[in-house]
Amino acid sequence: MEGIQIRPLNKKDRGWLKQFMVDAWGAEKVVSRGIVHEAWLLPGFTASIGGDLAGIVTYNIQDDQCEIVTLDSMIENSGAARANIQAVIDAARSEGCKRLWLITTNDNIHAIRYYQKRGFTIAAIHCNAIEHSRKLKPQIPHIGMEGIPIRDEIEFEMML
Ligand SMILES: CC(C)(COP(=O)(O)OP(=O)(O)OC[C@H]1O[C@@H](n2cnc3c(N)ncnc32)[C@H](O)[C@@H]1OP(=O)(O)O)[C@@H](O)C(=O)NCCC(=O)NCCS
C-alpha cells in the first residue's frame, strides 16, 4: 500500500512494545479463548507513514490457524491497520495457514464494523467468556467502549 512501510517486529522492539501493550491493553498480556498471550513477545508487524509509527499488529500461529492477537492504529483512517492485516495474511499463507481468526469484545462496536468491512465473518460468539478472562487478567475493565458492559468474545474468521 502506497506510502505505508511495513516491517516485521524484531527483538529490539520488545522493550517499547511491552510498555505499549500495557498502555493500549491494560497489561502486557492479552487473553483470548482462555489463553494468556504475552503479546509483546509475539511475531508481528509495524506500519509507518513518513517515519511515524502508524500501527502495530501481533499474531500467533498454531498448526494451520493464525490468530491476530492485537491490532492497533496510532494514525487512524490511514490504511495502516489494513496494511498490517494484509502483512499477517501474507505471513500466515506462507506458513501454510488455512484460517485467520481473531477475538474482539462485544463492546468494541468500531472493531466489529471494521473487521466485517475487511472481509472477516463472525464465526462464533462466546457468551460471557470475559468472566473467565478476567480471572486470568484482572485488569480487564467491566465497562468498555461507549459504556457497554464487556461480557462476550466475538470470534471473527477469514479463510485463507
Ligand atoms: C480497529 C482499528 C485498528 C482500525 O484502525 P484504522 O486506522 O481505522 O484502520 P484503517 O486505516 O485500515 O481503515 C480505516 C478506514 O480508513 C480508510 N482509509 C483511509 N485511507 C486509506 C488508505 N490510504 N488505504 C486504505 N484505507 C484507507 C479505510 O477504507 C477504512 O474505512 P472503512 O472501515 O470505512 O472501510 C483502530 O480503530 C484501533 O486501533 N482501535 C483500537 C484498538 C482496537 O480496538 N483494536 C481491535 C480489537 S482486536
Image: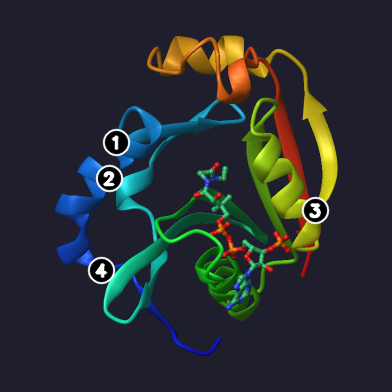
Instruction: Find numbered disc 4 in the image and state the secondary structure of the residue it sits on.
Output: loop
For the question of whether residue 120 can be seen, the reply is no
Give the image location of residue 47, x and y in percent: 41, 72
Question: Of the residues shown, which amino acid type is indicated by label 1?
Answer: Asp
- Reading the image, the residue beneath label 3 is 116
Identify the amino acid type marked 2: Phe
Q: Is residue 109 visible?
A: yes
Q: Residues within 10 Å of mark 3 (few under 14, many from 20)?
A: some
In primary-sequence order, the first of circles 3 and 2 is 2
- The disc label shown at residue 23, or none: 1
Query: Any mark on residue 20, and which?
Result: 2
Asked whether, in this view, residue 117 is left or right of residue 97, the answer is right
Q: Earlier in the sequence, mark 1 or mark 3?
A: 1
Q: Are marks 2 and 1 in contact (CB under 8 Å)?
A: yes
Residue 105 at x, y percent in the picture: 64, 29
Please give the name of the residue rendered at 31% of the width and 29% of the height, measured from the top-left corner.
Answer: 27
